[in-house]
Structures are given as C-alpha cells and as structure tokens.
Amino acid sequence: MKLISYQYNGQDSYGAVVGDRVVDLREAFGAQAPDLKAFIAAGLAAKAAAQVDAAHATLPLSEVRLLPVIPNPGKIFCIGLNYGEHIRETGKEVTEKPVIFLRVADSQLAHGEDIVRPRVSERLDYEGEIAIVIGKGGRHIGEADSWSHIAGYSCYNDGSVRDWQLHTSQWAPGKNFWKTGAFGPWMVTADEIAPDQKMTLVTRLNGQEMQRATTDMMVHSIPRQIAYISAFIPLEPGDVIVTGTPGGVGNKRTPQVFMKPGDVCEIEVDAIGVLRNGIRDE
C-alpha cells in the first residue's frame, strides 16, 4: 500500500492511495488510530488492506493537501556520510560507526510544498535520500531482525543550509531550518519492498540529474543503522531514519549549485515514487 497523511476540508487525516484516489482510513479506525503514526503502532496494515479493497467512498488525490508522511514522528535520525562518493567529495574518511544527527519535526514539509530558502542564507543545498519508517519498536535490535521492524519506505530531501551547517563542528542548525526537510509523497509499506532490495535513488534539479546511487552502495546498511541506533535509544513506531545522501551535492560542485526561488527539486526512488518540491524565499 501507499499510505499518506493529508488535510481535507481543514481536517487532518490519513489514508491509502489507490490510483488517483484516496481511501480515508482515519474514519475507518477512529479513536483507535487518529493518525498514521498511531495506525502503524497499532499494527493495522492488514485490516487496512481489507478496508481498501472494500472501499466505496474515496477522495480525489488532487483535492487533498498532503502533509509530511509522518507529521509527528517522535524521532528523526539522519545518517551522514553514508555513500563513498559523498565521503570523497567532502574530503572525509569512512567511519567505523554511522555518523548520526537529528532533525526536528518542525523542519519538515510535504510533497508539493515549497522548500523555504531562509532569509539568512543563500546556500540551500539538496540531499536526496531514502527514509525508513519504524513499524515495530525495540531496543538492541539485531541486524538479522531489523527488516521486521520497518513499516515502510519514503523519499526525503534533507535540505541543508551549508554555511549554518559549517558554523561549528555540530551540524544541527544547518539541518533544521524551517521547511527544509521534504518527506513524501507517501510511504510504501514494507511488504511491497523485499528486504535488502536494491533501490535506485536519483535527485534532479530543474530536470538535470544531480545525484544517482543504489542502496547497495551504502557504507552502513539499513540493518546496521537500525541496530546501531537501537543500541543507544529505544526505537518506536513512527520514528524515521533518513539513510544518507549520495555524492553530487551542490556545495561540492564546481561551480557550486544551490537551490533558489523558482527551482524545482525532485527525489525519485524507483520502488517508491517521486518527491517534488518548488523553492521559495522566506
């Protein structure tokens, strides 16, 4: 299934995308699961599939306002320096353990919304990534068991304000500007993507390909990321792990390329879909 969070007639909801229609699931599950995070935590995917198959009342996808796939994640972990080409272009070295930083939920935006270039910088960079959404929580999750803890996969643009990122050795400011982390358009449930399936990630800016990589090129695999993170904090349903960006970021090009108002950035993952956002000034 493709699951989305959205607004319709001013009401937040969530549902399944079937073609160009949306089956509302909030109405079906009510207080048991008022949002997509609660739906995932309650393990309602199998029941939802039956609801989708039997659905008669649907909404046009074009009439809903998408929200970030998980608007209210408890935690967003981002993996840095996780593709060899990106490590080389930054002049860094491969680390034995994953490089991890955090994003806050308030920095996120949805598919179709404009990424906001802040008034304090013009160095807004793209970072196409694959996000995983945790379905079953846990602590000290083994790599062999990690696939069973994934609810689904989505596209992510970890938009980075480079000068603020590099003010100090801590990256948090440059990675958490308002409306710079695009998340969507939907989550493809894990039953549709085989464990360790090789996925291709492509980033385009105004139609020009800027990044391309496959998931087998990751330095630290998705199971290793889950195992490492769950060793220091319990993972919970609805938590998000953004798994790293390939080489080709704008900051390391000659000449440098940054996103500017009027641009369109697309993140495409073959097994998931296309996340598309315009750019505007704050």
Image (cartoon, rainbow, N blue to C red):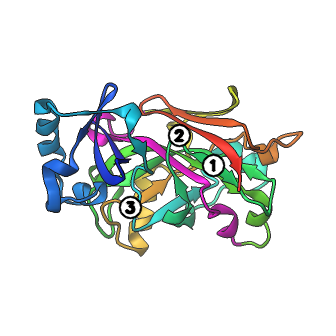
Q: Is 246 on the left or on the right of 187, as rendered?
A: right
Q: Quadrant of residue 20?
A: top left
Relative to 23, residue 132 above or below: below
Q: Residue at x 79, y 53 (%)?
A: 123
Q: Amino acid at mark 2?
A: Gly
Front residue of this view, candidates 254 and 208 = 208
SS category of the residue bearing label 1: strand
Residue 273 sits in quarter: top left
Q: Which mark is residue 239?
A: 3
Q: Does the stretch in magenta take in 248?
A: no
Q: Residues within 10 Å of mark 2 (few under 14, many from 20)?
A: some
- Label 3 residue SS: loop
Residue 204: % across, % down: 65, 32
76 to the left or right of 54 = right
Disc on res. 112: 2
Q: What's the residue at 42%, 44% (across, down)? A: 65
User: Mark 3: few, some, or many residues within 10 Å (few <14, many ≥20)?
Assistant: many
Looking at the rendered structure, the kind of residue marked 1 is Ile
Number of the front mark, 2 or 3: 2
Q: Which mark is residue 147?
A: none
Q: Is residue 93 visible?
A: no
**Magenta residues?**
170-197
Q: Residue at x 30, y 41 (%)?
A: 189
Q: Position of residue 247 (x, y in %)?
A: 69, 41
Q: Measure how far apart labels 1 and 2 are at the Cα level.
A: 9 Å
- Between discs 2 and 3, the one toward the N terminus: 2
Residue assigned mark 1: 115
